[in-house]
Image (cartoon, rainbow, N blue to C red):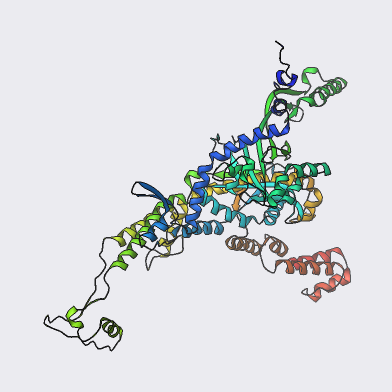
Amino acid sequence: METKLRRLSRITVPKGDRSPDSIVRSKAINMNDRARGQEILMEAQACYMSMHKFREERARNERYLNGDQWSDIIEIDEGGITRRITEEKYLKEQGCVPLKTNLIRKKVDAVKGLFIGQQTEPTCIARDRDEQQEAETLSTLLQYNMQLNRMRKLNADSIEEYLKSGFVMHRKWAGWNNAKQKEDCWTEFVEPNNMFVDNYMRDFRGWDCSLIGELHDLSYNEVMRYAKTPEDYQRLEKIFEYARDIRAGEYSWEQFGYSEQDIHKEFMCPTDSSRCRVIEVWRKESKPRYRCHDWNSGEVYKIDIKDYNAMVYDENQRRKIQATQAGIPENEIPFITAEWFMDSYWYYYFLSPFGDIIEEGESPYAHKEHPYVFSGKPKRAFTADTLDQQRYINRLYSLNDMILRSSAKGVLIVPREGLKNTTLENIMDQWAKPNGVIVVDVGTSGKLPQQVASNATNIGINEMLSMQLKMMDDITGVNSSLQGKSEYAGMSAAMFSMQTQNATTTLQGILNDFQEFMLDAAYKDVKNIQQFYDEKKVLRIVGKTANGFPVNARKALDTEVDISIVPSQATPVYRAFNNDTLLELWKQGAINVKMLLRHGSFAFADALLQDIEAQEQQAAAGQMPQGVSPELMQQVQQGANMEAVQKAQQALAA
């Protein structure tokens, strides 16, 4: 029997499948890029689908927050047949009006308002105090970037998302922004429904994250931004040929292997059939590298295996020769030591739903991380804790309305014997008139028409409603004082302030978590600024001098800084405190008028400072500036010496 001949590629072990480099190993095992991309997609999809419960809970929280509070699905047993129906529709079928009072929105707006009123901003602090001027320059650049990205509004809306879902994510990237038509460092809000993260994280800070990504729904023209050459354009056009069919209305879920009811289609297919789905995945990869320690400079860094000879061996040989010429013994030579280790690094992929790798590579950022900043405690979402109380309050309102509508209110009872000489319609018409006259035949019964009115039965609804409203305040920590309302008439200012402070203390956990999120975002912003800004851009933003000191742009971009969260200087309270401090220093003679105007927050500061500097220039040129005494100017004109000029300047500065 003839033996079947198999292809060599199917029976031999692909070269590189045993490589310690995960990228090399993946390329060796998968014979084409689409198969490798599909493997990555499956891992990303598993992370995305495991967050399905989070997305459902977030959608429910969002419905309640926006006032749609009767849309929960309930099951009704009708003769052994189970019917699924919304609570709102069921109540309407029972003749009840589904009333609601949205208290959740008020609570969320109160916390959001508290955050805006206590807005903080990051400030750079140099580790070396001699570099504090450069750190202040970085603070100015960071504030410029935050203003460019409208971070005050973005952070305010982000804390609302954090209260709603318990999760918030921003994307920090650098490049050309078509919306702003300029190149800079940008911050984007990531829709929680479109993101996915590693499911095996256990660190509250997210430091053990090994996979993170986002779903992008782009137009066909936007997808072409990934093309760098005409060949890339043709390749993308072929990959997204289905996108053209989507625009032409020839798209179906079955092309991706899903049915209309399949929840897994969320990952592969855009909700809007006119968009193109691109999946961005950042994954930890591994490869062997050398961890180097330069004993001469104290620097610790890592290099690739291929760079060992050029960066370590050759450099050590050069130092050995240099030491021999200088008479330094070999045991005193500060060689570069190198240790082999398996490095874990971030690698990115942009994939089509079919597994095509549109773009890939190691992290292009100097911080060597992914571009995302996130913080989350989904199981402890602020809004989720209030849903049960909100539901019960709505039920009490609806129940009270039903009792009031079903109670007897002004019912007229007319004996049947009294209708001989008139009609019921005539009695009803006369009863409604202010001066109506009703003529009835009393008959043998002797009964006259009478009105029956009944008060609603007190079953404790008011007490239950008050208790639930109090529980809502206790659960959220947002009491009436935090909303600007006093508990009772005549409350003292001290008591009101104490209750407001107590409510703020309850919310410190949420505010502190969000401040840590802002701190992580600021660190990533500063690192991107240091990488993508050049000296010309720094000087254009800060100016050649900052606060009277020359700016070393290159040194500022190379400075290692810490970042602290401080109260925002944009708040009226901070500006007033700053101005009072400067005015006190000026009264004591510690600073002059120019320093006061330069560092203060006065509406007229810039114009007045320009006038003073113009007067100084006039005095130096021998002219008589306005506001200087004629005697002093006569001395300047007669002597024209520097001493007189200095006296004039001192008089202006006094």
> Is there any visible trace of residue 56 in the rendered image?
yes
Q: Closer to the camera, 333 or 527?
A: 527
What residue appears at the point 77 percent right and 20 percent down from the top-left corner?
332
Q: Quadrant of residue 35?
A: top right
Q: Closer to the camera, 119 or 367?
A: 367
Residue 185 at what x, y percent from top left? 72, 49
- Is residue 544 left or right of 123 when viewed as pictured? right
Residue 493 at what x, y percent from top left? 43, 64
- Is residue 211 left or right of 53 when viewed as pictured? right
Q: Reply above or below: 323 against 134.
A: above
Residue 647 at what x, y percent from top left? 79, 66
Q: Which quadrant of the rendered structure holds the N terminus?
A: top right
- Is residue 92 left or right of 368 when viewed as pictured? left
- Is residue 341 left or right of 443 when viewed as pictured? right
- Which residue is at the far front? 1
Q: Which quadrant of the rendered structure holds the C terminus?
A: bottom right
